Amino acid sequence: MSEELKSLEAYSRYVANLIARFGVKRSTVTVWSISKYMGVVEGEIFLDGGYRLRIREEIDFAAGLIVSYGYEVYRGHQRLYWYDDFPHPNDPELAETYPHHKHVPPNIKRNRVPAPNIKFERPNLAGLLEEIEHLKKKEGK
């Protein structure tokens, strides 16, 4: 079980450390409890080059699991891609990372690829921010 997913306090510290580590321009991310054992993470992280990561997670601190999530990456007002955990059991191309997948252009709503970097058992935010940093370097931003 990931230490960060064991408590509201631990996950709040994890998010704050990430924001400091990645030189975030601005953040609206909040972490709060909805019960003794459940928490919600929601908001946006604004990065240089007009990039923005929109986050929604539900976390079961008793089990140490992310039970639901949605991550969307934008540049300006354009949504570049998103990750979600909505199951698509009839898509054999997504079987290796079921139910985790990434929506990518073209036809972003229907074009899905496996998401091996996304898990329920550990935090995903560092990997998502690293992916955006890589994209920024690739585009020279």
Image (cartoon, rainbow, N blue to C red):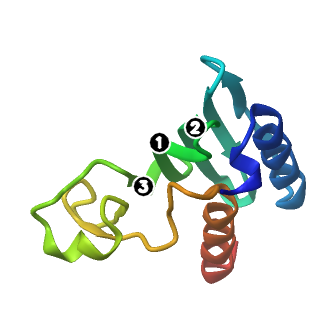
Specify few, some or many for label 1: CA neighbours under 10 Å numbering under 14, 14-19, or 20 or more. Answer: some
Marks 2 and 1, how far apart at CA: 6 Å
The earlier-in-sequence mark between 1 and 3 is: 1
Establish if 72 lies above or below 30.
Answer: below
The amino acid sitting under disc 1 is Val
The amino acid sitting under disc 3 is Trp
Q: What element carries label 2?
A: strand
Q: Are the two marked residues, 2 and 1, in contact with CB atoms closer than 8 angstroms?
A: yes
Q: Are the two marked residues, 2 and 3, in contact with CB atoms closer than 8 angstroms?
A: no
Q: Mark 2 points at which residue?
A: 59
Tell me which corner region of the image, top left, top right, bottom left or bottom right, holds residue 13.
top right
Residue drawn at the location 64% of the way across and 55% of the way down? 123
Answer left or right for 20 relative to 140: right
Q: Mark 1 points at which residue?
A: 67
Q: Depth check: give the residue in front, 73 or 8.
A: 8
Q: Mark 3 points at which residue?
A: 82
Specify few, some or many for label 3: CA neighbours under 10 Å numbering under 14, 14-19, or 20 or more. Answer: some
**Image mark for residue 77:** none
The earlier-in-sequence mark between 2 and 1 is: 2
Q: Where is residue 20 in the image (x, y as percent from the top left)?
A: 90, 52
Answer left or right for 58 relative to 9: left
Specify few, some or many for label 2: CA neighbours under 10 Å numbering under 14, 14-19, or 20 or more. Answer: many
The earlier-in-sequence mark between 2 and 3 is: 2
Q: What element carries label 1?
A: strand
- Seen as rendered, the residue at the extreme bottom is 138
Q: Depth check: give the residue in front, 23 or 32.
A: 32
Q: Position of residue 37 (x, y in %)?
A: 63, 26
